[in-house]
Amino acid sequence: MNFFFHFGLLTLFARGEVDEKLHAHYIEDFNSYDLDKNGLIDPQEIRTVYHGTLLEEDLKAFWDAVDVDNNGYFDLKKYVDYALKQEL
Ligand SMILES: [Ca+2]
């Protein structure tokens, strides 16, 4: 776990936005996509996880929803924000 990733977790916990159990689930999801374990997920990592079975248009739709500030990757914070929206 790198520093920024850890810091992101602490921030979320401190803000009390996510309960611990839910959090563990999201962290597990996030880590399964973060292949190089740098605390960030880029589109290529998603493609690799899906072994080329993911349609580019589906990836784009997901990406538009998760990468809200369009910087080309997402961290745990953006992922959790996205995941929580999906549960509403
Ligand atoms: Ca990564």
Image: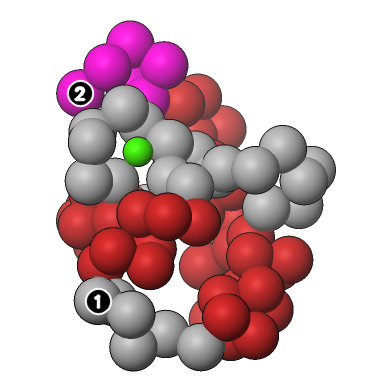
Few, some or many residues within 10 Å of mark 2 (<14, 14–19, 20+): few
Residue 43 in the image: state x and y as whole percent: 50, 56
Q: First in sequence, mark 2 or 1: give its number.
A: 2
Is the residue marked by circle 1 packed among few (<14), some (14-19), or many (20+) residues within 10 Å?
few
Q: Residue at x 33, y 11 (%)?
A: 3
Please tell me whether residue 42 is drawn above or below residue 4 in the rendered image: below
Q: Which residue is most to the front?
A: 52
Residue 21 visible in the current orientation: no
User: Where does label 1 land, which residue?
Assistant: 51
Q: Main secondary structure of the magenta part?
A: helix
Q: Locate the C terminus and report the quarter of the image it occupies.
A: bottom right
The residue tagged 2 is 1
At a point 29% along the width and 46% down the height, the residue shown is: 34
Q: Is residue 5 above or below residue 43?
A: above
Was residue 57 drawn as part of the magenta stretch in this picture?
no
- In terms of depth relative to the viewer, which is nearer, 52 or 26? 52
First to last magenta residue range: 1-6
**26 with respect to 7 (left or right):** left
**Front position in the image: 72 or 67:** 72
How far apart marks 2 and 1 lie (CA) works out to 25 Å
